[in-house]
Amino acid sequence: MSYQRVKFYQTGTFTVGNRLLDEGDRTVQARTDRSNSLNSGHRACQGCGEALGARYALDAVMRATQNKMVAVNATGCLEVFSSPYPESAWQIPWLHSVFGNAPAVASGVAAALRAKGKTDIRVVAQGGDGATVDIGFGCLSGMFERNDDVLYLCYDNEAYMNTGVQRSGATPARAWTNTTQAVGTEPGNPMGIGKNLPRIAMAHGIPFVATASVADLHDLETKVTKAMSIRGARYIHIHVPCPLGWKSDPAQTIKVARLAVESGLFPLFEAEGGVVSDRTPIRKQVPVEQYLALQGRFKHLFNPRDEEALAAIQAIADRNIHLYALLPTKPAMET
Amino acid sequence: MIEIRIHGRGGQGVVTAAELLAAAAFHDGKVAQAFPSFGSERTGAPVTAFCRIDTKPIRSREPVTHPNVLFIQDSTLLHQVNVFSGLSDQGIVMMNSTRKAEELGLNDWIVQHPEVEIYSFPASDLAEKHLGRSIANVGMVAGFASVTGALTKEAVQYAIQEKFPGKLGALNVQVAAEAFDYVSSHKIGV
Amino acid sequence: MKQQIEGSQAVAQAVALCRPEVMACYPISPQTHIVETLSRKVKAGEIGNCQFLNVESEFGALSVLIGASAMGARSYTATTSQGLLFMAEAVYNAAGLGLPIVMTIANRAIGAPINIWNDHSDSMAMRDAGWLQLFAEDNQEAVDLHIQAFRLAEELSCPVMVCMDGYILTHAFEEVDLPTQEQVDDFLPPFEPVQVLDPQDPVSIGAMVGPEAFTEVRYLAHHKHLQALEAIPRISQAFQDIFQRSSGGLLKQYHTDEAETLLLALGSVNGTIKDAVDDLRTEGWPVGAIQLCSYRPFPSHALRHVAHNAKRVIVIEKDLAVGNGGIVSGEVKLALQGLPTIVDTVIAGLGGRAISKAAVIDIVKAACLEGLEEPHFLDLNWEAINRELTKQAEQRRSGPTPENLLREIGLSSGKAL
Ligand SMILES: Cc1ncc(C[n+]2csc(CCOP(=O)(O)OP(=O)(O)O)c2C)c(N)n1
Ligand code: SF4
Ligand SMILES: [Mg+2]
């Protein structure tokens, strides 16, 4: 689906007023016939970004497939808070196997659908960052490499939240977690390590890779809808703040997510066939400090101020801005 | 043996309350065991924790199903969870509420259980006052020590300072002191 | 020093006192508090030059330790449940290679249906992997067994699992006497590997062995466990000499003399069982209890020695051999074969269901008065089961069984507690 990005600067905020859009461009959630893949009454914490992201993403898939879909879920917060029997919050066929195999289970669902000639039914797999970048990484790479007809959604809250906040391969530099505590010579997660899964996905040359954030739900829906218009392996990496693990105010989840985008720490882009094909430019870059200061997991960087760490994190943001040409004035780096 | 069951919600320091009780009892030279009711519950969901206090070794590992003391850290649970299940007829209920037991819709229950003592006091308000956070656990532990004499005031303070080092500990000791006096000076409950 | 401390914290302290050199851990409930504490200690520089690796899976964790141990480093990890199964290939491999790794198992059920609570299905699934398996009754014993485990593992060059009940012990806050560094250093000598990757003296570790010698190699693995039958009590005694308390050993007895009925169990439920034995004895029932501390090696001779006069042994086990019944009870029967002793299997405590003293007392009386069907499932909700079976018989697409059952149980009790 081609779409035009709509800008609403007149309100002085970044709010995308749904009602100002043409009927057809409004979000799925704005429609009276919205599907509500994930019902209310689940057990997520207040302000859970993952719950929000999952509902928007799966509702968009439901709409794109006229409800002909199956979801496979890895173990993690989303699975645990949404599914306790007999109160499943899911309105779609949903399968949880174990923590590390969701991409392969989804490949199996897709294979069975091929075997039965039911290619109108589509498959989505989803998991947290731990399930995706760590324990399920091998299965995910296999699914990409075979180009199985699966959309994989990663809800990145940057740690293992379900087990009580331990670091994952996606935990950012210098963040506190229970296995990267704020002690020792380099408090928090060590600098300069971690896994950038969107780029690894791109390296597989799969048809569609995108990043998205709960800061821009319309963009998230649009990307999911686009992904569903394509066959083959697709990957969307969604940034979802977790108030519990990030030690942030549950009421500020969207703001935190937005600052991640506007600082350049979480670039929003799309890639087709392994090449970046679109990006969401930043109107005005905010210093990373504004983002970090809202989260208790970075508290040790401010008291006393750890100038070196702050500068290093700023450099990561600056590099992203350069790499993805997020500011109109800066040309893209060779990607 | 004193068997205490604590009801609250995820994020309200329910497990900490049980640990403070056990730590204080240990400091008093008693034997104690505290453990949570092991859920994968997220913030806000009903949770339970247990504490046993005795003078001889405690071997049992079963959850406390017949408590002689109940802590209710969140009175909204009264009508959601069967908090009184198994409570001894001569039991003690420590309730965190600004309202009297009679005002919490418990009249019938009170009539049926004439020997149960209910102490309702605003433990979370006391914490709000000193800490700026309305977390009831410390006040509940101190209130329990005050009405029962099962734990000394010093032991409660010691346990608090051990659990929360530094300034937070000092502030919590103030919460405990006020709760201790509040409960003993207000003829609350029953 | 005596402390009121969480089981996981106590175990982490004990492991730190053992001067581990490499740890690689992957979080999983209810093991997390152990590894979080150890990661903090390493990061804060409290365990010398110890390396703590945050890995991408349990398979990675144990594989890291296989490398570390083969390089001669004292190595430790902890896991449970799904995590233990995820590392299964490496679990067998570490034992096959004879690498003295110590691993805490915070025992937990295995899914599906996913369940984070305690039972013994996980370590039981690995019972034939070649690891020694020691079970702790309380947190004091959990601490003590870890210290003994390093010595045992390194003496025999065989990996050891220290099993402690998830949540029931890992999350219990109770009194534990933590030893001093001097005591531990006195007891635990530095690690002297029997095989090591050394450029000065190169050896190949892990090469292929064909039919001509495979059986002999396997026999030698078995032989190590036979040696362990002697080493475990000896090391437990050496421990007592230094630490002045008795912990571990092959099995422990409680009022077994003159007992006609013996309860036998592994792990923390032994506390509740002892309380039940006291109550039953007061009522005049000649009952005693055996705590199996070493499950691998299985102490058949010691058990036969203790139980040979009993009329009945009731095995209370937190696991299920689906399609057969008891796992432990089968081995108890084998140990007692030829004796007239009746061995009952009571499957209990699965997926964290509490085992109450009252239920233990009831089951002893029922067994002695009426006998038990084999195997017996403690506190089984037959009503819910029968309704589900009827439903399954009536309709082909009856749906996910666990969900149906929960609806049944919700309908039949409606209790929230
Ligand atoms: C093999 C295995 N190892 C460990 C676990 C424990 N475990 C369950 S969920 C989880 C972390 C989930 O993290 P993530 O995928 O980032 O999802 P989140 O909860 O953060 O949304 C872990 C470690 C498990 N279930 N299985
Ligand atoms: S812990 Fe974080 S990810 Fe999990 S439910 Fe709570 S807010 Fe959501
Ligand atoms: Mg995560």
Image: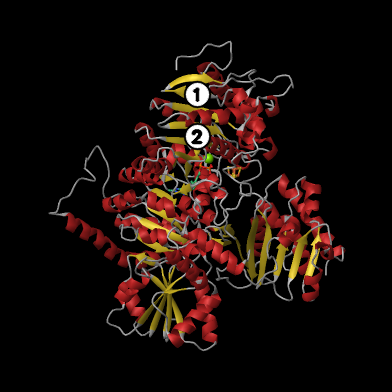
**x%, y% of residue C33?**
53, 51
Q: Where A249 falls versus B58 (above or below)?
A: above
Q: Earlier in the sequence, mark 2 or mark 1?
A: 2
- Residue for badge 2: A170
Residue C46 locus on image (x, y percent): 51, 44
Residue C370 seen in render? yes
Q: Which mark is residue A18?
A: none
Residue C4 x/y as whole percent: 60, 60
Q: In percent of the image, x 54 and y 49: which residue is there?
A: A80
Which amino acid lies under the numbered mark 1 shown in the image of this protein? Glu
Between B177 and B85, the one nearer to me in the picture: B85
Which residue is denoted by mark 1 in the rendering? A270
In the image, the residue with mark 2 has its CB under 8 Å from the nearest atom of ligand 3: yes
Residue toward you, C260 or B66:
B66
Q: Nearer the viewer, residue A111 or A273?
A: A111
| Circle 2: element type | loop
Q: Residue at x 60, y 25 (%)?
A: A261
Task: Identify the secondary structure beneath mark 1.
Answer: strand
Quadrant housing the C terminus of chain A: top left
Instruction: Give x and y (percent) for residue A198.
Output: 46, 28
Q: Say left or right for A314 vs C38.
A: right
Viewer-proximal residue among C321 and C240? C321
| Amino acid, disc 2 | Ala
Q: In the picture shown, does residue B68 fall above or below C242?
A: below
Q: Label 2: chain?
A: A
Q: Residues within 10 Å of mark 1 (few under 14, many from 20)?
A: many
User: Marks 1 and 2: in contact by CB < 8 Å?
Assistant: no
Q: Using the image, name the chain to which the residue with label 1 belongs.
A: A
